[in-house]
Image (spheres, grey):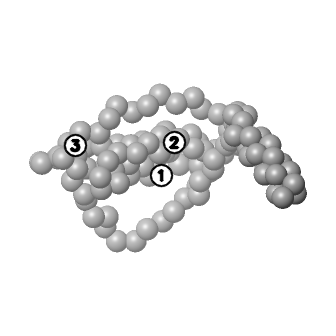
Amino acid sequence: MRKGVYALALALFFFVGCAEEPTTVTTTTTTQEVTTTGPAREVVVTRTPPAVRVETQTVPPGPGYVWTRGYWRWTGVDYVWVPGSWAVRPRPAAVWVEGHWVRRAGGWVWIAGHWQ
């Protein structure tokens, strides 16, 4: 019986330590160029997208990286924020064209970001 009480007390101390506030960690996300084939299907969203969030750019992970701004993605039910990230420029003269929402008949359509 006493061993059970001691084990319970130790377990409580263990889980109390797990409930502490996490420390702040800064991470850098990198992405790779993805090529798709075929035309993309347009999805018309009837709800207006929220205003774009202002993000703080982190330090680039190295030369040749370009910041791609965050954007609101439609899940089929609601908008969720996709944070900005660093992407490797596929060729020296490549320019990143930001993705954006465009007003169309009946709602809004997402135009994905791409390299030009």
Give the SS element for disc 1: strand
- Taking the view exactly as shown, the residue that stands out farthest to the bottom is 38
Question: On the image, numbered disc 3 is attached to which residue?
Answer: 47
**Crowdedness near tag 2: few (<14), some (14–19) or many (≥20) residues, C-alpha within 10 Å:** few
Q: Which residue is mark 1?
A: 115
Residue at 78% from the left image edge and 51% from the top image edge: 8
Looking at the rendering, which quadrant does residue 66 occupy? Answer: top right
User: Image check: 18 left or right of 31?
Assistant: right
User: Which label number is shown at residue 83?
Assistant: 2
Q: Amino acid at mark 1?
A: Trp
Q: Amino acid at mark 2?
A: Pro
Out of 55 and 90, give the one closest to the viewer. Answer: 55
Q: Position of residue 76 (x, y in %)?
A: 30, 56
Q: Residue at x 65, y 33 (%)?
A: 58
- Tell me which numbered mark, 2 or 3, is placed earlier along the sequence: 3
Q: CA distance from mark 2 to mark 1?
A: 18 Å
Point out the residue furthest to the front here: 1
Q: Position of residue 30 (x, y in %)?
A: 63, 50
**Mark 1 vs 3: CB contact within 8 A:** no
x then y, percent, for residue 103: 20, 42
Mark number for residue 43? none
Distance between the Cα atoms at labels 1 and 3?
Answer: 28 Å
Q: Considering only vertical position in the picture, is 41 above or below 85?
A: below
> Is residue 17 among the parts visible in the rendering?
yes
Near-viewer residue (32 or 15): 15
Which of the two discs, 1 and 3, sits closer to the camera? 3
SS of the residue under disc 2? loop
Q: Secondary structure at mark 3?
A: loop
